[in-house]
Image (tube, helix red, strand yellow):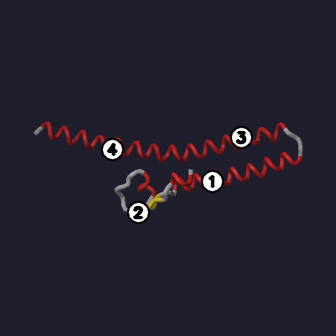
Amino acid sequence: MNRMMALKVCLTCLIALALLMNKLFYVAQIVYKININMTKTSILLLYLRIFVQKQFRIICMIMIAIIVSYGIASASASVFQCTPIPRAWNRTLPGTCINITKNW
């Protein structure tokens, strides 16, 4: 009897660990998308400090606007990829999800 009890406890711990790992992956997706877009924006801001040509600076500003817009859109898509949101890390909940890999 003790062996069955230990097996149930172990199985429960594994399920809890899997849910925790899924939550961490969910957060990591969002953090990654924000960080990658901030890095790109940082490089363009450095270019704005270095280069003085008007046309180049305008192009940099346009690229910054595009990158910031894409960053907001991709981070929002990662946050709201499932309805309800907890379904992103717990697929046993009822609801729907978009295919987030197509967005990458």
**Mark 1 vs mark 4: which is more N-terminal?**
4
Residue position for label 1 = 72
| Mark-to-mark CA distance, 2 and 3 | 38 Å
> Which amino acid is tagged 1?
Ile
Residue position for label 3 = 42
Residue position for label 2 = 95
Q: Position of residue 28 (x, y in %)?
A: 51, 43
**Mark 1 vs mark 2: which is more N-terminal?**
1
| Mark-to-mark CA distance, 3 and 4 | 39 Å
> Which amino acid is tagged 3?
Ser
| Mark-to-mark CA distance, 1 and 4 | 31 Å
| Mark-to-mark CA distance, 1 and 3 | 16 Å
Q: For numbered disc 1, what is the local secondary structure?
A: helix
**Mark 3 vs mark 4: which is more N-terminal?**
4
Where 84 sits versus 50, above or below?
below
Nearest to viewer (mark 2 / mark 4): 2
Q: For numbered disc 2, what is the local secondary structure?
A: loop
In the displayed structure image, the side of residue 40 where residue 14 appears, left or right: left
Residue ID at (59%, 53%): 74
Viewer-proximal residue among 26 and 103: 103
- Number of callouts in the render? 4
Q: Residues within 10 Å of mark 2 (few under 14, many from 20)?
A: few
Q: For numbered disc 4, what is the local secondary structure?
A: helix
Residue position for label 4 = 16
Q: Position of residue 79 (x, y in %)?
A: 52, 54
The reply to whether discs 2 and 3 touch (Cβ–Cβ < 8 Å) is: no
| Mark-to-mark CA distance, 2 and 4 | 21 Å
In the displayed structure image, the side of residue 94 where residue 2 appears, left or right: left
| Mark-to-mark CA distance, 1 and 2 | 24 Å
**Mark 2 vs mark 3: which is more N-terminal?**
3
